[in-house]
Amino acid sequence: MQNKTKNFTFLPNGKPLSTLKNEAKKLKKQSKFKTLSEAQNALSRSLFNKPLNKLSKNLEERSPVVISGILYLPLVVNTKQFECFSEEEEFCYYVAINDKELGISKDMGFSIENIVSEGFIKDLSFGSFEKMLTDQDVWNGWHIKLDKEHFVEVKTTDEGIVADLYFDNGSELDAFRSCYILFEEMVSFNYESIKNDSISDYKAVHLFGHELESDSTVFYTIGEIDCALSGTWILTNEEGQFIKPEEMIAQMKQAGAEKEFWSWLYGKDNDLFEGFEVMTAPYFEYQNEEGDLLGEVFDTLPKSLSEKTLEIAEFFVIER
């Protein structure tokens, strides 16, 4: 769905990842380590108690990224803030910014169109960002320069996430645009079991009991945008009889061919199912509160809760 990616990967101490890699190169040239990887991992252990190869995925997920002209700012949130989750874990909620506006959810945001120059997103550099820390030196947000006189701060609070647009003329600081989202408005999951699962639309039909083309199930809502499964898959056999999903799965289990059936349903040829034909197909979609389609339909859920949030955040700025 999204491409043309540019990562601004920061270390937990707020410095760019490149600072650690450059220092590791110096140590390697001084023959203090046999390989660059060993030097990088040693430095990372000394600073963060983890080797870099164990830290890398976490660093990228918790750092700003530009994808297809949209800047995504991650804010770390704990699932203990939400009644829909029974287990505690951290994930990233993303605020989106393009050349026209900042969006914190589908309906919450503010315009920056008359402030930033054309190509603002393309011209972002590491110097555009600063990690914000609480009084206890805990990272809680981002400071982003828009131009010489304006900047945005996006941070977590005790109640949710707030974004403020500031004017700074060197002697005076004024927050003149602001928006926020409460934890209870950020995320709602109807099926906690799939929060870190990347299931396909065909498998979801079986797991959640869709039998009719008109069936629709909202799995989760992020930033006022629903992720729904619509429709079902129905087969016909050689006699032209219609077979619903639960009936077909039951037959395949009895025949010991369930694994082969799923492979065939996903497109792998198998003579065992010659004569069967898929008549209808399900799909996932993102919807607004009125049930209108946002973007294109798709066939597989993003895997982690952070990945689900990142993909849906696109519509915080392009659909308002």
Image: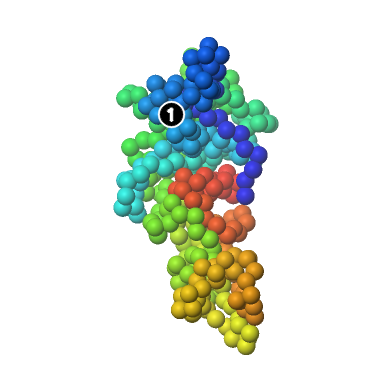
Name the secondary structure under disc 1: loop
Q: Which residue is drawn at the image coordinates 61% and 34% (left, top)?
A: 6
Q: Dot 1, how many residues are within 10 Å of its Cα: few (below 14), some (14-19), or many (20+)?
A: some
In this rendering, is residue 98 above or below 226? above
**Residue type at numbered disc 1:** Pro
In this rendering, is residue 47 above or below 218? above
In this rendering, is residue 6 above or below 294? above
User: Relative to 22, is 181 on the left or the right?
Assistant: left
Q: Residue furthest front?
A: 34
Q: Which of the pair 68/243 is nearer the observer?
A: 243
User: Relative to 290, is 12 on the left or the right?
Assistant: left
Q: Which of the pair 90/38 is nearer the observer?
A: 38
Q: In which quarter of the image is residue 119?
A: top right
**Colour basis:** rainbow
Q: Mark 1 points at which residue?
A: 51
User: Relative to 219, is 262 on the left or the right?
Assistant: right
Q: Which residue is drawn at the image coordinates 43% and 51% (left, top)?
A: 196
Q: Which of the pair 96/240 is nearer the observer?
A: 240
Task: Answer yes or no: is residue 308 visible.
Answer: yes
Q: How many marks?
A: 1
Task: Answer yes or no: is residue 291 visible.
Answer: no
Q: Position of residue 289 (x, y in %)?
A: 50, 58
Q: Which residue is drawn at the image coordinates 45% and 79% (left, top)?
A: 254
Q: Where is residue 113 in the image (x, y as percent from the top left)?
A: 62, 35
Q: Position of residue 186 (x, y in %)?
A: 42, 47
Q: In which quarter of the image is residue 234?
A: bottom right
Q: Where is residue 96 in the image (x, y as percent from the top left)?
A: 54, 40
Q: Residue furthest bottom?
A: 239
Q: Which residue is drawn at the image coordinates 65% and 80% (left, top)?
A: 275
Q: Which residue lies furthest to the right in this view?
A: 118
